[in-house]
Image (tube, rainbow, N blue to C red):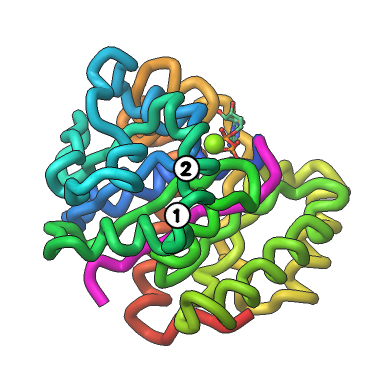
Amino acid sequence: MRPKTIAIANQKGGVGKTTTAINLGAALAMRGFRTLLIDLDPQGNASTGMGVARDIRRRSTYDLLLGEESAADIALSTDVDNLRIIPATMDLSSADSELMASSRRVIHLRNALRLRETPFDYILIDCPPSLNLLTINAFVAAHSILVPLQAEFFALEGLSQLLLTVREVRSTANSDLRLEGIVLTMFDKRNNLCQQVEDDARENLGDLVFDTKIPRNVRLSEAPSYAMPVLNYDPTSRGAIAYRSLATELLQRNRSEAPADV
Ligand code: ADP
Ligand code: MG
């Protein structure tokens, strides 16, 4: 099942999708896995956070979706060995309506990723904060979905809508789609509400919730302005330690069992 393709999704903005895509990607790459990060959000935060300046984003996710080139042709290398990225540009915001005009509208990304054998072990897709056609393309192209869940009030309500969409995609275009898991982000153990959300999540979703929690850590929010993953910016920070641990857990799960069902 190479490359293993994981969509990082939650229709809520600001929950840690991009931070997870960059740092999980870096952690996998640092273990020697050839990793591709696809920036599927027109805001391009993953691209900026990885140091891909706007003027060198000549080819982008837009071309991957609507052009003829393969992922390996478009991907740029980064300062992290084994980690490449397909950046996003603003024209991705019009891709949604352009895809709508296509009869194959939900399978563009999947087709692009299968165009040729890709030289990657993992592909991580950083989804936009919406369940739009871009996100659906990611769900159709992916083996699994990783959901960052910010430990705050109403977090679980948004999740049920996301799971409905997963079921819909499963019953139409991608019957093998699995949930990789749910990772609690911006966790503050002194905050009772965080603890309550964790308890609720573990009670309702069981093993789907990763043991690893990503703490609220200022180094994680500083790293993008230095155009690098926190694993490079401050490798001993709590944020870096947490994302390395998330990668370990993900690799263990992938070795020992099939990703869980919804
Ligand atoms: P999304 O992609 O879901 O919109 P981001 O990953 O961009 O979310 O995170 C939103 C903001 O929160 C960003 O400014 C990011 O740097 C910050 N952030 C994300 N995770 C953490 C964390 N664990 N601790 C502190 N700040 C974080
Ligand atoms: Mg984002």
- Residue 92 x, y percent position in the rendering: 44, 34
| Residue at disc 1, secondary structure | loop
Query: Front-most of 201 and 62?
Result: 62
Quadrant where the C terminus sits is: bottom right
Query: Front-most of 98 and 230?
Result: 98
Residue 183 appears anywhere in the view: yes
> Is residue 5 shown in magenta?
yes
The rendered magenta stretch, by its main secondary structure, is classed as loop
- Residue 83 x, y percent position in the rendering: 22, 43
- Residue 77 x, y percent position in the rendering: 16, 34
Residue 37 appears anywhere in the view: no
> Could you classify mark 2 by the number of other residues whose Cα lies within 10 Å: few (under 14), some (14-19), or many (20 or more)?
few
Q: Is residue 173 above or below residue 232?
A: below
Report the residue that reaches farthest toward the bottom.
257
Q: Is residue 127 above or below residue 245?
A: above
Q: Is residue 179 above or below residue 128?
A: below
Q: Is residue 62 above or below residue 47?
A: below
Residue type indicated by callout 2: Glu
| Residue at disc 2, secondary structure | helix
Residue type indicated by callout 1: Ser
> Could you classify mark 1 by the number of other residues whose Cα lies within 10 Å: few (under 14), some (14-19), or many (20 or more)?
few
For the point 37% across and 74% down, which residue is it?
Answer: 252
Q: Quadrant of residue 37?
A: top left
For the point 29% across and 63% down, which residue is it?
Answer: 111
In this figure, which residue is indicated by the disc labeled 1? 102
- Residue 151 x, y percent position in the rendering: 75, 49
> Is residue 210 shown in magenta?
no
Magenta residues (range) = 1-13
Quadrant where the N terminus sits is: bottom left
Q: Are marks 1 and 2 in contact (CB under 8 Å)?
A: yes
In this figure, which residue is indicated by the disc labeled 2? 98
Residue 105 is left or right of residue 60, and the answer is right
